[in-house]
Each structure stands twice: as C-alpha cells, then as structure tokens.
C-alpha cells in the first residue's frame, strides 16, 4: 500500500542586512552574523571599508572620516538594492547610520536593530515611520554612546518612542565583537538572545 506523503514546510526566517562598526568587517562581526545564521536567518554583511580593518576605535573612526560619513551611509544604503520587503536592518555603532537611514526611508523595511548608538530621527526625515519595529542595545557607561543618549531616549518606548531599549552595565563599547578587547561573552550572549527574539517576532 502506498504511503501517504508528509510535507513539512520550513517557516521563513528573517532577511537581515547587518552593518559593521568603525573597526570594519572584523572576524568578530562575521562571528556575530554567523550566530544569527545558525538560527536560520539570512544575513548579509556588507564591507563598507573595502577589506580594511582596524585595531582601535579611534583609528577606525579616523578612516570613516577620511571616507566621509555621508559616503559610508550611501555605501550602506546601496547594499539594500535588490533586497525584498520585510527586510530587517541592523548596525553596530558606525553601522547604525546606514541602518537607521534605511529604516526611516526605505519602503518595505520591517524592523531595525541598533547596537551601541542611535542618531536623532530628524537626521533622516520627519521621525520614525509607523510599522517599523525597533530594538536598541546600549551600554550605560559607554563614553562613545554618551552623546547619543538623547536620541536613544527619544526613540525609547519608555519615553514615548517606538523602540525597545536594553541597557547593559558596562563601560565597553563593542562588547559583542569577539575579536575586540572589550568583548564580554555574557553580555554578547544576552544581545544575541534578544536579537533573535526580535527577529523571530518580525520575520
């Protein structure tokens, strides 16, 4: 007797465009992306520096200044060409700039995850668009993020904004990059767990 066919259809996962920080597309950034991929998500990691990486945030920021922040943003925005609707954009520190611009200006973006930074929403338009989910991860003692806290608070749901905000008790900046000296495995694990929960809710 013929056996009945049993078809199991995989649930579609999120399509993520993840932008690196000022150090470039480091091994730690690739490892972070692999953590998301291991959960079944499709993750694109553009290299906005053309292969260059740096050992210090100061040197990385200087490189971004040489390129020009506007040019870095536009390189990132161009990476979304050809990607479909339902896209989740994410960025670490410097990478927040193209991620946030795409979230606020590109039709079809479903959500954004901003790590270690945020900029005032008026930088890219009239405000945060309705229907675009937002999650932010900020270290409470991070000197690099201190000047961004006004923008973070504007975007935080605790202050009437659209975003879910997680604060971490550390003075480190790039705490989720396993190839950088500020890496904190415990906090990075929390960041990944919360990111995966966000992606599961908005894929």
Image: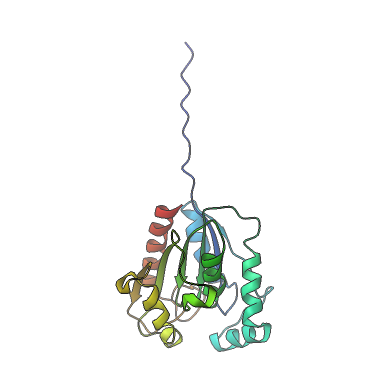
Residue 151 placement (x, y as % from top left):
42, 79
Residue 1 placement (x, y as % from top left):
47, 10
Vertical comparison of 61 with 158: above or below: below
Vertical comparison of 58 with 139: above or below: below
Does 51 sit left or right of 148 as displayed? right
The outermost residue toward the front is: 126
Residue 14 placement (x, y as % from top left):
49, 53
Q: What number of labels is visible?
A: 0
Q: Residue at x 59, y 64 (%)?
A: 45
The outermost residue toward the top is: 1
Q: Residue at x 55, y 70 (%)?
A: 101
Vertical comparison of 59 with 118: above or below: below
Colour scheme: rainbow
- Corner quadrant of residue 172: bottom left
Residue 98 placement (x, y as % from top left):
57, 71
Q: Decide which of 57, 101 is in the foreground and name it.
A: 101
Q: Decide which of 99, 196 is in the foreground and name it.
A: 99
Does 67 sit left or right of 84 as displayed? right
Vertical comparison of 196 with 1: above or below: below
- Corner quadrant of residue 196: bottom left
């Amino acid at each position: 007797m013929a056996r009945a066919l049993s078809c199991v259809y995989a649930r579609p996962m999120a399509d993520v465009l993840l932008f690196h920080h000022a150090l470039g597309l480091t091994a730690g950034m690739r490892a972070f992306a692999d953590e998301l991929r291991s959960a079944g998500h499709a993750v694109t990691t553009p290299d906005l520096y053309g292969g260059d990486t740096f050992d210090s945030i100061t040197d990385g920021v200087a490189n971004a200044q040489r390129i020009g922040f506007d040019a870095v943003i536009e390189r990132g925005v161009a990476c979304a060409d050809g990607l479909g609707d339902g896209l989740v954009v994410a960025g670490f520190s410097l990478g927040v700039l193209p991620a946030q611009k795409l979230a606020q200006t590109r039709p079809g973006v479903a959500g954004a995850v901003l790590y270690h930074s945020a900029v005032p929403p008026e930088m890219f338009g009239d405000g945060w668009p309705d229907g675009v989910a937002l999650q932010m991860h900020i270290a409470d003692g991070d000197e690099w993020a201190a000047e961004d806290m006004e923008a973070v608070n504007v975007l935080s749901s605790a202050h009437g904004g659209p975003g879910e905000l997680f604060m971490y008790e550390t003075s480190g900046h790039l705490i989720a990059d396993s190839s950088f000296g500020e890496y904190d495995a415990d906090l990075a694990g929390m960041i990944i767990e919360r990111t995966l929960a966000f992606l599961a809710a908005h894929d």
